[in-house]
Image: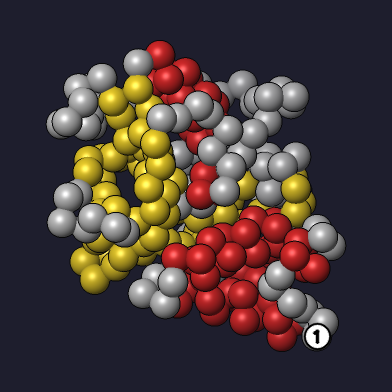
Amino acid sequence: MKQESAAQNTPPASPPPSPPAQHPRDHGDPQALWIFGYGSLVWRPDFAYSDSRVGFVRGYSRRFWQGDTFHRGSDKMPGRVVTLLEDHEGCTWGVAYQVRGEQVSEALKYLNVREAVLGGYDTKEVTFYPQDTPDQPLKALAYVATPQNPGYLGPAPEEAIATQILACRGFSGHNLEYLLRLADFMQLCGPQAQDEHLAAIVDAVGTMLPCFCPTEQALALV
C-alpha cells in the first residue's frame, strides 16, 4: 500500500490525481478519518494519528503488481510494491490509522505526495474489520494502484517478481527490505492472516539466497 517517506528528495513533476468528493468518516466521530495501510504504511506511516488498529478488508487481494521508480526502485530498474486487486474471495490484512482534526488535512497532504504523486496510487473507500472487533467494521480510505497508472506492471510469476525485488533499490531502501517487513507484519497478525502471493515470493527469494533468513539478520543486509 506502498508508502514511504521522501521529504528530502525532489518529487517528479506530475499532477496528483483528483481526490474523491468526500472521504469516508468515522460515524462515531465526524471529525475523524480512518486510513487503511497494507504496504509500508503498516510499519512506517510517517504521519500523526490518534489511534491504530490491525485488521483486514474483504473483497481484495494484495499483489506485487505496482512498479516503483522512486521509493524501492529507479527509472532503469523499477521495484515491485503492492496494490489491491478486487477479488470476491480475497482478504487483505493491514493497519487502519485514525486521524482527527488537523491531523486529517496533514495526513492527506503527506499521503498525496507519498502515494499519489510518487507512487501512482488513487484513493478508494474500503470496509475495514478490526482484528479485535470484526463485528464493528469501519469505513476507511485506501490508496490503490490501478492498471491505468503508468507505473503499473501487472502480474508475473512469483519467481520473476522475486528476482526483480532482489535487484532493486530506491530512495527509501532496498526492495527486499519492503518484502521482508511486510512478511514480518503478517507473521505478527497470527495464523489467521494468510497471503499466499506474499508467501510464494518470500519462498522464491529463499531459493535464490541459500543463506536467506527472514529475520533481523536479513533486514540488516538491505
**In the image, residue 74 above or below residue 33:** below
Residue at the image point whose x is 72% and y is 42% from the top: 172
Please name whichever residue, 8 or 116, is drawn nearer the observer in this view of the structure: 8
Residue at the image point whose x is 24% and y is 71% from the top: 89
Colouring convention used in this rendered image of the protein:
secondary structure
**In the image, residue 16 above or below residue 149:** above
Based on the displayed image, in which of its 4 quarters is residue 29 positioned? top left
Classify mark 1: helix, strand or loop.
Answer: loop
Dot 1 crowding, Cα within 10 Å, few <14, some 14–19, many 20+? few
Residue 38 coordinates in the image, percent (x, y)? 45, 52
Quarter holding the C terminus?
A: bottom right
Q: Specify the amino acid type for callout 1.
A: Pro
- The residue at which mark 1 appears reads as 210
Residue at the image point whose x is 62% and y is 47% from the top: 68
Residue 178 in sight here: yes
Residue 122 in sight here: no
Please name whichever residue, 189 or 178, is drawn nearer the observer in this view of the structure: 189
Residue 45 coordinates in the image, percent (x, y)? 54, 38
Residue 194 coordinates in the image, percent (x, y)? 41, 74
